[in-house]
């Protein structure tokens, strides 16, 4: 391990030389930061080295990387899905379209594309609860939920969501009554699933925008319900 | 491949650790790893199925100890070397081989919005006969290919019902190995939880698995 690590670091540092050169003026100003950033983590070095190599070969455009990261950090996330859900709650005809042709209905709100090319929306009712997982990797509906949280990609969730889904829900604080049917959707193909949660009682007078603010990412995966208190910003 | 990536039904993996107000990326390198992988995919030297298969080939101990985006980078490097986009020597030295041509990136910033908006559809508009129809009982095949497959172990040799025909899609088992798309119908198949897990499962619960025509036989 020690040998591998040293060899790797040698290679990575050499390759990343250009971008790893410390900015001396900054060193003075941020000495406290540098205390724990003197040796960047292995993945940091490795990815920097790789990026530099690929840019140098003309295989990669740094501006494209920035655009991709910016999109998923700032533009595409669970607020998109929340707007879809709120529209379905507010407009029965839209809900009908959403449940029968999800791609077109989601497209009406301007969402779609990468890792959401083929969407399916499943509806929670008082008698049916839906839960989405990808046991084989981490398939997730990016256009409406953004990139998946770590727990969704983790072994504990992927392994247990199919064999012990009620236990999983309990872990998220949700006790599912025995008379509710639980449907687990394993995203093994190129279909991507979005849960349409139940509209909370007491939300009758809310605007579509206020409804959207109630909808969490977790509710659209199926590990939570939707309450009337505003928790939309939580996830 | 019966690898550790095929996790459905495994036990002893511990508690689910949900993080409040989780950032999209936990460190700048994760965003870069994500974006580099996306951007290199634009060269179309491999496909999504090949990418997944490459990640499945990461040895089990590494699969569990490496973080998610570290696995992405490991698989990306393998794919780039295999397809000749970079050489092993270049990865080791970190600098282009002498005399290697300077190329023009396949994905530029201007093309990013289109890539994201259009995606990479796996559905194919070709006439293929469906072997099964909604409501029919089917048995998933008991297959154990060493290559790539999207038929999870827990759902093999089980009896279920066709819930819905999703249409015709690229077949990952062949596509991952660059043996052609072999487009075929994908069905949502409903398995009763008890068919999969026995008496310990709740009688009213079920698992829906999206399965290709080749994975199924009449029951």
Image: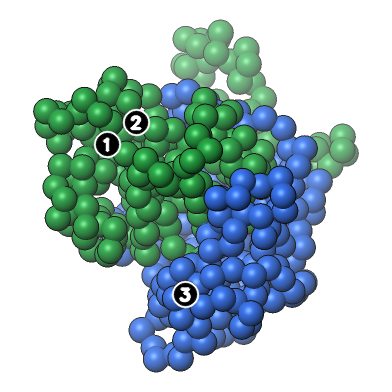
Element type at marker 2? Answer: loop
Q: Nearer the viewer, mark 1 or mark 3?
A: 3
**What residue is at 53 percent from the left and 63 percent from the top?**
B190
- Label 2 chain ID: A
Q: What's the mark number on residue A199?
A: 1
Q: Are marks 1 and 2 in contact (CB under 8 Å)?
A: yes
State the separation of the CA atoms marked 1 and 2: 7 Å
Measured along the vertical axis of the image, is residue B2 above or below residue A231? below
Measured along the vertical axis of the image, is residue B100 above or below residue A213? below
User: Which residue matches tag 2?
Assistant: A226
Residue A146: x and y in percent read 39, 44
What scheme was used to colour the molecule? by chain
State the separation of the CA atoms marked 1 and 3: 30 Å
Residue B61: x and y in percent read 81, 46
User: Which residue matches tag 3?
Assistant: B135
Q: Are marks 3 and 2 in contact (CB under 8 Å)?
A: no
Q: Which chain is green?
A: A
Along the viewing direction, whichever of B94 and B126 lies nearer the viewer = B126
Q: Which chain is blue?
A: B
| Whether residue B195 is visible | yes
């Amino acid at each position: 391990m020690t040998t591998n690590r040293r060899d790797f670091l040698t290679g990575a540092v050499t390759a990343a030389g250009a971008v790893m050169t410390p900015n001396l003026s900054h060193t003075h100003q941020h000495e406290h930061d540098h205390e724990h950033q003197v040796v960047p983590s292995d993945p940091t070095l490795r990815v920097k080295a790789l990026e530099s190599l690929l840019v140098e070969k003309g295989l990669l455009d740094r501006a494209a990387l920035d655009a991709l990261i910016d999109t998923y950090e700032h533009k595409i996330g669970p607020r998109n899905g929340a707007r879809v859900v709120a529209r379905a709650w507010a407009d029965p005809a839209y809900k009908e379209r959403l449940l029968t042709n999800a791609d077109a209905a989601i497209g009406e709100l301007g969402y779609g594309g990468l890792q959401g090319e083929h969407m399916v929306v499943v509806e929670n009712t008082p008698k049916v609860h839906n839960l989405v997982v990808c046991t084989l990797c981490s398939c997730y509906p990016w256009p409406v939920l953004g990139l998946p949280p770590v727990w969704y990609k983790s072994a504990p969730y992927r392994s247990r969501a199919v064999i012990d889904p009620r236990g999983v829900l309990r872990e998220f604080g949700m006790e599912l009554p025995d008379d509710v049917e639980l449907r687990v959707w394993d995203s093994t193909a190129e279909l991507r699933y979005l849960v349409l949660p139940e509209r909370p009682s007491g939300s009758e007078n809310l605007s579509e925008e206020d409804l959207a603010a109630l909808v969490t990412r977790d509710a659209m995966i199926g590990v939570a319900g939707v309450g009337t208190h505003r928790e939309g910003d939580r996830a | 491949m019966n690898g550790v990536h095929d996790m459905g039904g495994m036990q002893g993996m511990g508690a689910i650790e949900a993080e409040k107000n989780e950032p999209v990326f936990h460190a700048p390198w994760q965003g870069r790893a994500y974006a580099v992988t996306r951007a290199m995919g634009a060269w179309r030297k491999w496909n999504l199925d090949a990418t997944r298969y490459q990640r499945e080939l990461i040895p089990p101990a590494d699969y569990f100890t490496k973080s998610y985006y570290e696995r992405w980078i490991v698989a990306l490097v393998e794919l780039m070397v295999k397809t000749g986009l970079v050489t092993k020597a270049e990865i080791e030295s970190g600098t282009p081989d002498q005399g290697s041509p300077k190329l023009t990136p396949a994905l530029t910033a201007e093309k990013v919005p289109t890539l994201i908006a259009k995606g990479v559809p796996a559905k194919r508009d070709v006439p293929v006969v469906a072997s099964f129809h909604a409501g029919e009982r089917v048995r998933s095949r008991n297959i154990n290919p060493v290559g790539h497959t999207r038929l999870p172990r827990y759902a093999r040799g089980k009896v279920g019902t066709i819930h819905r025909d999703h249409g015709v899609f690229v077949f990952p088992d062949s596509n991952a190995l660059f043996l052609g798309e072999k487009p075929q119908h994908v069905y949502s198949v409903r398995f009763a939880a008890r068919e999969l897990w026995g008496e310990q499962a709740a009688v009213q619960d079920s698992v829906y698995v999206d399965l290709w025509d080749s994975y199924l036989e009449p029951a």
